[in-house]
Amino acid sequence: MNDADTPLERISKEEMYMRMALILSARSTCRRKDINGTIKRVGCVITTSNLNNVLSVGYNGNASGLDDRCDNPDQPGNCGCLHAEENAIAKCHAPDRDKIMFSTDAPCKRCAKFIIQNGFRKVYYLRKYRSCEGLELLAKVSIETEQLALTQNDILNQICSASNGWN
Ligand SMILES: [Zn+2]
Ligand SMILES: [Zn+2]
C-alpha cells in the first residue's frame, strides 16, 4: 500500500467540536470562580444532529454592547453574566429539534431548562458542574448526555508543530 492509500488519521467530530468549545471559552469575560477558586470560563458549540454544521457558538459573559465584565464580580452565582449555553441558544435560529450541544462544562439547572425548551438530542460536556441537577433534568426528559475526554493530542501536535505549535 503506498502513502496515498493510507487514510489520514483524523480527530473525531466530537473531539473537534469540544476543542472548539474550549477555544471559545478563552473569549470568556466572566470572573466567576468555581468551588476550587478557579475562574470558570465556559465555551459552547451547537451543531446539527449529523454533526456536519455549526449552528451557533457562545461563551459566558455579559450581553452584547454592555461592559465586557461581570455586573457583580463578588457575588458567586449572581455575577450577572449570561452562561455560555444561554448565549449560544439565544443566537441559534435553527428550527432543528435534534440539535447537539458541546459545552466545556455540564449545564446548570437553568441552562438545562433552556436546552429542553430549545430542542436538543444530546449534550456533550468535558467537566462536571458542582451540582448534578442540570444533568438529572436532561435525563428526565430523555436528552442524552455524555462526558467526553480529549485524547487525540498526537494528531493536533503533528499538524501544529508544522506551524506555530499547539502548546
Ligand atoms: Zn460573570
Ligand atoms: Zn448555566
Image (tube, grey):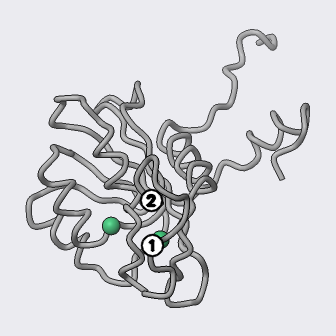
Residue at figure coordinates x 15%, y 36% from the top left: 97
Amino acid type assigned to the residue bearing label 2 in the image: Asn
Pointer 2 residue Cβ closer than 8 Å to ligand 1: yes
In the shown orientation, is residue 133 left or right of residue 150?
A: left
Q: Quadrant of residue 10?
A: top right
Q: Quadrant of residue 165?
A: top right
Measured as percent of width and height from the top left, residue 136 is found at 19, 73
* Residue labelled with disc 1: 71
* Number of numbered discs overlaid on the protein picture: 2
Which quadrant of the render holds ligand 2? bottom left
Mark 2 falls on what kind of element?
A: loop
Measured as percent of width and height from the top left, residue 95 is found at 17, 29
Gap between marks 2 and 1 measured at Cα:
8 Å
* Residue labelled with disc 2: 62
Given residues 143 and 45, the one toward you in this image is: 45
Given residues 81 and 148, the one toward you in this image is: 81
Residue at figure coordinates x 43%, y 86% from the top left: 76
Residue 80 vs 148, above or below: the answer is below
